[in-house]
Image (cartoon, helix red, strand yellow):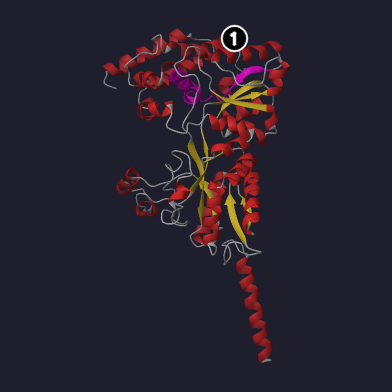
Amino acid sequence: MRKKRIALTAALAATALLASACSGGGNEGSAGEAGKQLTMWTWKVAYTPGFEAAAKLYEEKTGIKVKIETFTPDDTYRQKFQAAANSKNLPDVVHWWATAGDSIEGSVLELSGEVKEDVMGKFVGTAMDPIRITQSQVDSWASDKNATTVQKSLKVGQFYGLPLDIGGFFTFYGNKKLLEEAGVKAEAPKTWEEFVSMMEAVKAKGSASGLVFGAKLPDLWENWAGSALTIMHGGPQAYTDLLERKTRLSDPGNLPVVQAMETLAQKDLLMPGILSTDIDGADQAFAAGKAAFDLGGSFTMSTLLAMGMSPDDIITFPVPPLSGSKIASWTTDPFTLTQLSVNKDSKSRDDALDFIQFMTTDPAAAVAFANGAYTVPAVDLGADSANLDANLKSISDAFAKEPGPYSEAAPAINSLRGKHKEWEVYAQSMQSIIEKKMTAEQAAKKFDETLEKLEASGN
């Protein structure tokens, strides 16, 4: 009987060990061991095909499978992460927003001492900026009574994830079918005036409107298109001068950008009801064929595909310049969208770290992920960018590899556009232009008068 009990105990121990090896915390062993599996969580349904494509390449390379689980919406995912962190039952790999000080740091591996410089040098420009802890953040958390214990423990230079993908605004999407039916070549316009002509051709056909965007948000146009038009037209310093109140909106160098919106309104090229349309509504209208063009960001593509569109039916291009602009084509500095982190308690920590480095820096894996998820990878692909989907390639090409014109104006944009109240008035005036209740000249005059009154009052 005693021998039977010993045998049973040994069998149960072996079963428990096997179960542990298959649990969310990962399993022990070195890379390449047959039958091994990593677990990974994400909240982005649209990214799942991309993750699966890259995971397949990783399995072919190492023999290690990666099980991907998706939990949505965002709040559900955050709650699940916190519950798993509290019970120490996180997966081996965590997909997260590209932030620093989000308090996941208490549960994931600090990477500054783990990732070599040759890996770090593979990312584009500023990809690490939102992930790496800065001195200003440390100082802010130190004096903030509401800062978390985790935030107060962080040190300058630490980072807890690797950048996965990047994005930006200033992107137009075009419906190839509507354009071709209107006798228009489905290709990116070289100028704003050519863009307007394309919209006019579609409208003349009578099948759809020219353009839709989330105009319900008063400042969306300036954030996603207007600022680009201004910076290209007069150069970054010209926009900075306007923000610093050194020039006026009614000046000949600035007025044409306001008139660009007036042209769209006066020619009835905007989708009816656009002022009650939010971002999701604009994407839905475009996907339904109600407008030939949609204004969004690089991240809009995955949304459109989730709504049933095919990438073969879409063209993408950055904001085209007004004729005579100082800058002939738009590039913008991308910002990091998401990151990959490693569970610090993972039993397969080394393999998980190897996987996130593979996912984020191996060109083949990055391309496979990007084309499956329809997002631009954060690694500098170089010549391998030719393997991106044509629309992703177009978006990627519009991202500045070095600080671009937007970067030159960015300090003034970040510090002054929200502070100076004439920009709130301008956003409201743009909506009045859309309604044909105000001309471009009237909107510019109201902006200037507001600016001067605020300056006179010390605001």
Residue depicted at x 51% and y 29%:
169
Q: Nearer the viewer, residue 281 or 361?
A: 361
**Quarter of the view holding residue 352:** bottom right
Task: Determine which quarter of the picture holds residue 212.
Answer: top right
The location of residue 80, given as percent across then percent down, is: 55, 53
Q: The residue under label 1 is which amino acid type? A: Lys
**In the displayed structure image, the side of residue 340 where residue 253 appears, left or right:** left
Counting from the top left corner in percent of width and height, residue 406 is at: 43, 27
Indicate yes or no whether the magenta region holds residue 445.
Answer: no
- The answer to whether 441 is drawn above or below residue 180 in the figure is above
Coordinates of residue 390 in the picture (x, y in percent) = 63, 31
| Residue range of the region highlighted in magenta in the rendering | 208-232
Q: Residues within 10 Å of mark 1 (few under 14, many from 20)?
A: few
Residue 296 appears anywhere in the view: yes
**Would residue 79 be visible to someone looking at this image?**
no
- x then y, percent, for residue 150: 39, 54
State yes or no: residue 228 in magenta: yes
Depth order, front residue of 159/10 = 159
Which residue is the site of mark 1?
Answer: 267
The residue depicted at 38 percent of the width and 30 percent of the height is 414
Q: Could you tell me which secondary element the residue under label 1 belongs to?
A: loop
Quadrant showing the C terminus: top left
Q: Quadrant of the N terminus?
A: bottom right
302 left or right of 408 in image: right
